[in-house]
Image (cartoon, helix red, strand yellow):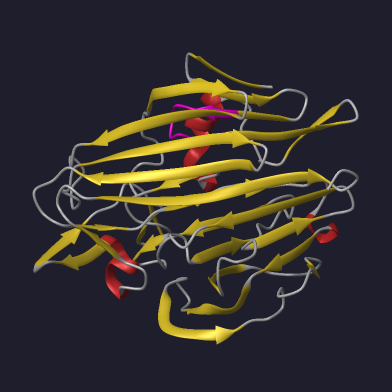
Amino acid sequence: MFSAEYDAGYARLQAHQRHDVYIFTFGAVLNRFALFHQGHWHNVIAAYADEHDARARITERFASAKLSPFACRLKHGHYHFNGTDYHTGSHHLNGHAIHGLLYNAEFAVTRIGSNATGAWVELSHDYTGNINGYPFPYRITVRYELNENGLTLCTEVQNHSNQPMPLADGWHPYFTLGGQADDWTLQLNAKHRLQFDNDLLPTGNRVDDTRFTAPASLQNAELDHCFILANHDTPACVLQNNLYRFSISPDASYPFMQVYLPPQRDSIALENLSGAPDCFNNGIGLITLPAGASHRFSTVYQLQHLESA
């Protein structure tokens, strides 16, 4: 039995005594994807205390942020598009614009519902082109759908300007299985990653990296890399410990997986990306969206207890 409800500031989706999902209207942030097992809930999202906490701390590490219209770093906040030079960015780190323009945007719930097979909510935001250096109005709609297959996150971007617009899309969630990452294993459907320079910007080269083609311990691992997915026939990544198995299965709209293991080692960022960091400049995965056109991005999260997997 599925249900969906909306209250001031958040939407909730439930599969009775199975999964529980909370989404803030602030940033369309996913703050809870929890599994019920033997009387206990486990939230796989490294969560904020509440919406106020998210508003106060979103730029600390951009946990669960929607990355749009660019993802990760944009070199010095500069790019050249269709014969024009632009400088943009709402937040900068070490001189580079980072994580897009909508991480703190206010979204509105436009649809919500449930039936015998699932529950869903859609949240939309109209970007007016008001931020310097990105004069391309667009509507972004994020749909969360909970069903027996897991939680699907679908993003649609519609170009409302009268000219083409540069675009990349992504997510920046941190996940936890409980305890420390040194007790978890990671498997990635990737054999290569992008080579980064000292500013974590792609050099244009790729390097072999097969450490996680089979499940491998995260003990002593240091990760801040953008992996190139081999295909979309199997999950892009599987995170597991002795109790839980969590997987991410994007469609072809997300060909990259950014993986970051923070110093605290109590969570891991597994980020679906449509384009490489700095793709407005290097062109790796850059989408040029025509005026009036739309583009969709989709990924699926699955969380299982190993006794019931």
First to last magenta residue range: 22-30
Q: Is residue 25 magenta?
A: yes
In the rendered image, residue 275, in percent from the top left (x then y), is placed at 40, 65
- Describe residue 296's horizontal placement relative to residue 134 as left or right: right
Residue 170 visible at all: yes
Q: Is residue 154 magenta?
A: no
Residue placed at 60% from the left, 56% from the top? 249
Q: Nearer the viewer, residue 299 or 194?
A: 299
Residue placed at 73% from the left, 55% from the top? 265
In the rendered image, residue 100, in percent from the top left (x then y), is placed at 36, 51
In the rendered image, residue 115, in percent from the top left (x then y), is placed at 57, 22
Q: Please, which residue is most extreme toward the top here? A: 7
- Describe residue 217's horizontal placement relative to residue 235 as left or right: right
Looking at the rendered structure, the number of numbered marks drawn on it comes to 0
- Describe residue 38's horizontal placement relative to residue 175 as left or right: right
Residue 64 visible at all: no
In the rendered image, residue 132, in percent from the top left (x then y), is placed at 18, 47
Residue placed at 21% from the left, 43% from the top? 131
Residue 37, picture quadrant: top right
Q: Quadrant of the N terminus?
A: top right
Q: Nearer the viewer, residue 231 or 67?
A: 231
Q: Please, which residue is most extreme toward the front here? A: 116
Q: Is residue 170 above or below residue 112?
A: below
Residue 92, picture quadrant: bottom left
Residue placed at 36% from the left, 34% from the top? 105
Residue 227, picture quadrant: bottom right
- Describe residue 131's horizontal placement relative to residue 219 as left or right: left
Q: Is residue 88 above or below residue 57?
A: below
